[in-house]
Image: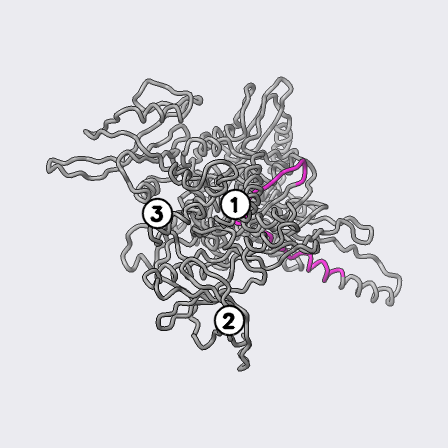
Amino acid sequence: MQYLNFKEDCNAMAFCAKMRSYKKNEVNLDVLEPGVEVVFYLPDRKPLHLLSGEYTVEDLCIRAAQECCISPLCHNLFALYDEKTKLWYAPNHCIKIEEKTSLRLHYRMRFYFTNWHGTNENEPSVWRHSPKKQKNSYERRRVLDATPLLDASSLEYLFAQGQYDLVKCLAPVRDPKTDQEVHEIENECLGMAVLAISHYAMMNNIQLPDLPKDVSYKRYIPETLNRTIRQRNLLTRMRINNVFKDFLKEFNNKTICDSSVTPHDLKVKYLSTLETLTKHYGAEIFETSLLLISSENEMNKLNSKDCGNIICYEVMVTGNLGIQWRQKPNMVPVEKEKNKLKRKKQDSKHRKDEEKNKAREEWNNFSYFPEITHVVIKEAVVSINKQDNKKMELSLASHEEALSFVSLVDGYFRLTADAHHYLCTDVAPPLIVHNIENGCHGPICTEYAINKLRQEGSEEGMYVLRWSCTDFDNILMTVTCLEKSEMLTSQKQYKNFQIEVKKGKYSLHGSDRVFPSLRGLMDHLKKQILKTDNISFVLKKCCQPKPREISNLLVATKKAQDCLPVYTMSQLSFHRILKEDIIQGEHMGRGTRTQIYSGTLDYKDEEGSSDEKKMKVILKVLDPSHRDISLAFFEAASMMRQVSHKHIVYLYGVCVRDVENIMVEEYMEFGPLDLFMHRKSELLTTPWKFKVAKQLASALSYLEDKDLVHGNVCAKNVLLAREGLDGECSPFIKLSDPGIPITVLSQQGTSAWCQLSFLGRVWVEIIFFSPFGGGGQDMAKKKSHINVFSFNSVFAVFILKVTVASLICWLCLNPMVS
């Protein structure tokens, strides 16, 4: 028999009185003071209080990061949140403090990746990219080129934020399905209180038995659970209290006393448990009554009404899985039945409703962040566009909520795809705009800066501009220098110079001269001879950020790793086709050093049937007289084998026999685009041309992201699979292989092709060709390197697509070129 402990009960009553007075004080905090107040979750940090001035949200986030010792590297994980309106502010949002301004914002970690700690074996780990280092054979098997996502200060802040979210139910616990699971969740919440109290004791050097009486588990469990416990009878409350004491005692004896855990371990355990205890921790869910998902030839408008009932949809954004959507599940009400027959019918109906609800609970994937090209906001409607021309449109409650949603997608894009790019001008961070204008990197580490200089050639005077990894007020300039020794030999060295940024003014450390812009400072320094450690040099070329460049600014998730570009082809790879399996047909034309034939390919059904089937294909036969360029021929085939996109021709393989080298490709019924447009010029409308241009841009965007160079984009290399002239469906094009690269052709043959090639990554040179003044050769002479996917304006992307359409028309009206 268990007797009541009246002493403990009196202590509990006294503590309840203290809690009531604590809550009274807490209510007083809800009174807003004039100005802008930025609140922190760290108990020892006072709020940031501003009474006058004009600030961008990015400015306030930087000041908040400095207050909380958050590094510039982790600063982009945080944002400002208004608990009253439940909205996040975009980084470029401007706050002007006036007499009537009264605003309280919470500084929160918004961009979250589950299993960043790597303790969950059922989920892929998440980390930051790190420069590759020389390892021995054992380390090569055991150690990844990675660094932790969070630094110590960010982890400390996230731990405090996680406790607040759990207690205030901003991160609600998962829904229990059975009574047993209800008890399991309660025990897990008590376990979270054990971790939080143990961390408090360790940080304050207090033994758990000596904790103050006002430290109770009730301060560390969800408020909803606390209210539920209060409604239970005295014996139940005492049982829960004893269970908690047993938890705490056992944890103290087995872990704390023998120093087997550290405060860091407790924080990681708390946050990892929080991910499984709560529903969708770190995710943001937006409700919409209008959701439209469309592709090139089909449109799926999800109905907002079903049998008179308004249907809501949910769009969820997470760091690990990207953008997902589903129909919002409905709560099925249970009614009382008057008789058994009615009950059976009702049970059958409820069962069907539950099955429907279960199907609705499943999330549908739309896109991961590297697949997105741009985002458009029109009042409260958001359009998200992908590389494959799929688009999601959703209508939100207000323009402010639309900005909150887009700033979330935009921020995750910079963390997983491209740290120096933004998807929408409406939420573009001022610092990113500044970096793009000045060719400056974010806070990349020194190793990445040096690697970049080496990749660019590491010539004397070449430099990289980058923000400091430790100080928000400093920009570092890493320069390649040549140090001459006594033996008159030169040795390359890399020196860092500090540029101080104070109140929007820039100056080189050690110099008194101040410039209003970074560009003005760099223009001045380029005219000077700089000296350091007996080394003198002149600044020459700035190595600017490249699209989707890998650095420690990017977070490596499983999906992000799948989207990584294919770099250099270390070995040729393609499927070999036997000569006996192909039959050569009629001659269809001539390519670059190749003869083109129609043909058939024999293949066996995938199910393992012995019956062979025939497929119509295109055969590209390399002229035997040009066997010296067969390696380039195989390289083109290998490149095509690595890609998989609906607007790029599929390569079945290569046939190599004696003197014959044959590329076997997918057959396109309507042939090259230039010939088709000559034949059907009178039937082609502007919308038709625009759709073709959009599909071509999609294929080129895909190649750009894979870091692959086509090198020969022209109308005759664009093949037509579907005409699309009947109005019922759109045209469908596919980009063919580049053929023999321009770099391996003779100097005599090169001149005829110079105006047709999109040299290297700079494939948009041809867009500024004849119809707009100037030719491809002029562009080549100027070495004007323009990368279409560096444009940070939706308008620029639109202009690009229209220009490509004009280009196609022009090519087809100039037979000497096309």
Residue nearest the viewer, comparing 544 with 242:
544
Mark 2 vs 3, N-terminal side: 3
Tell me the number on the disc at residue 131.
3
Q: Is residue 28 left or right of residue 577?
A: right
Q: Nearer the viewer, residue 784 or 385?
A: 784
Relative to 183, is 409 above or below?
above
In three-dimensional space, the C-alpha distance between marks 3 and 1, rounded to whole angstroms, equals 23 Å
Q: Camera-side residue: 477 or 233?
A: 477
Secondary structure, mark 3, is loop
Which label sits on residue 684?
A: none
The residue at 38%/38% (across/down) is 781
Q: Residues within 10 Å of mark 1 (few under 14, many from 20)?
A: some
The amino acid type, in three-letter code, at marker 2 is: Gly
Relative height, residue 527 to residue 5 (above, below): above
Q: Please state which amino acid type lies under the numbered disc 1.
A: Tyr
Residue sitting farthest toward the left: 487
Instruction: Residue 649: give x, y in percent of width and height.
Output: 51, 60
Q: Position of residue 700 (x, y in %)?
A: 50, 50
Q: Is residue 229 left or right of residue 567?
A: right
Q: Which sits in the foreground, 192 or 387?
A: 387
Quadrant including the N terminus: bottom right
Question: Is residue 245 at least partly visible in the picture?
Answer: no
Q: Residue furthest front?
A: 816
Q: Earlier in the sequence, mark 3 or mark 1?
A: 1
The residue under label 2 is 585
Please give the residue where the numbered disc 1 appears in the rendered image. 112
**Amino acid at circle 3:** Pro
Establish if 457 lies above or below 253. above
Please report the bounds of the magenta region as a residue range: 353-381
